[in-house]
Amino acid sequence: MARDLPPLNALRAFEAAARLGSFSEAAAALHVTHGAVSRQIKALEADLGVRLFRKEGRGVKLTDAGQRLREATSEAFDRLRVVRDELQRRNAETPFVLGCPGSLLARWFIPRLDRLHRELPELRLQLSASEGELDPRRPGLDATLWFAEPPWPADMQVHELAVERIGPVISPHHPRCAARVKAGPEALLSEALLHTTSRPQAWPTWAAGQGLEVAALRYGQGFEHLYFLLEAALAGLGIAIAPHLLVADDLAAGRLLAPWGFSETSARLALWVPGRQRDERAERLARWLEEALG
């Protein structure tokens, strides 16, 4: 099947040489050798069956055919440059929509949002909160930040950021805080544990890792979302379990205590990006997240 157009690389070499009036200057502009430009133009002449340049002194001059082609290529390449600039400007002005669980958004991301704006001022971030099972393929999302377990799907670019670690936390305002802090993990078997329906396996997973009998766990007040679970723990209403990342600020400030430690799970905090194309904004955000989490 015949081509509709001459080779694009040859046209680029011709357009640069015609615009600059020199093969050498065209080579410098295109970051290739003089020989590469010369070969591309010879190939273009062979493809069209006409001469495009003739030697004149130490330089070159367009033939009549070359002049006609220059007018066409100049207009086409100028238009492409305009459209490229428009698309790049539009991309820079379009918000970058990040999906994120509401608990992660409220307890880790928002406290660091001012820092992100200072360090990535060009990223017009729009946050989309969700609880429960997220769908990183949801239309309108540019990326999704969440805890999930590998293997990763082939149609997504997944930037692994941190291993998930979970553990029980208790408020200093809890009526039995002092006694519980001095006791080992087995003391939790006598507590009515706060829990969440979004992570029903959190307590059993942690307890099994501590050698505790999972069947002996007792559950108290349940919450639909992790954010509310941790608010209850902060109020001293019971002992909750949560990813370390979501309680790190509270632990540092002494609002919560974690005397029984944290255990790794098979989940990873990762930034998921639809695999349709490379997105420099997502890559910059992934690098920023790695530093912020470090």
Image: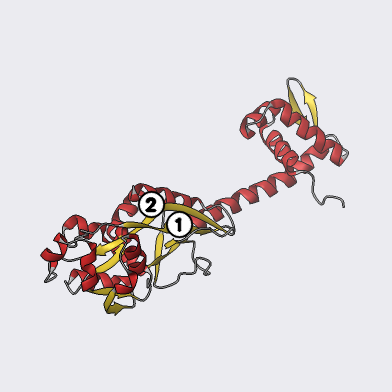
Identify the disc placed on residue 244.
none
| Label 1 – label 2 distance at C-alpha | 9 Å
How many numbered discs, if any? 2
- Amino acid beneath label 2: Leu
**122 relative position to 247: left or right:** right
Q: Where is residue 244 in the image (x, y as percent from the top left)?
A: 30, 58
From what the image shows, is residue 29 above or below residue 78?
Answer: above
Q: Name which quarter of the figure residue 262 lies in.
A: bottom left
Query: Callout 1: 10 Å neighbours few (<14), some, many (20+)?
Result: many
Q: Where is residue 107 in the image (x, y as percent from the top left)?
A: 29, 63
* Label 2 SS: helix
User: Residue at the top extreme?
Assistant: 58
Whether residue 45 appears in this view of the structure is yes
Identify the disc placed on residue 289.
2
From what the image shows, is residue 281 above or below residue 202?
Answer: above
Q: Position of residue 198 (x, y in %)?
A: 38, 73
Q: Earlier in the sequence, mark 1 or mark 2?
A: 1
- Do the numbered discs 1 and 2 sit on residues whose CB atoms are within 8 Å? yes
Q: Where is residue 235 in the image (x, y as percent from the top left)?
A: 17, 72
Q: Name which quarter of the figure residue 233 lies in.
A: bottom left
Viewer-closest of 215 and 120: 215
Whether residue 95 appears in this view of the structure is no
Viewer-closest of 96 and 196: 196
* Label 1 SS: strand
What residue is disc 1 on?
271
- Amino acid beneath label 1: Leu
**107 relative position to 286: left or right:** left
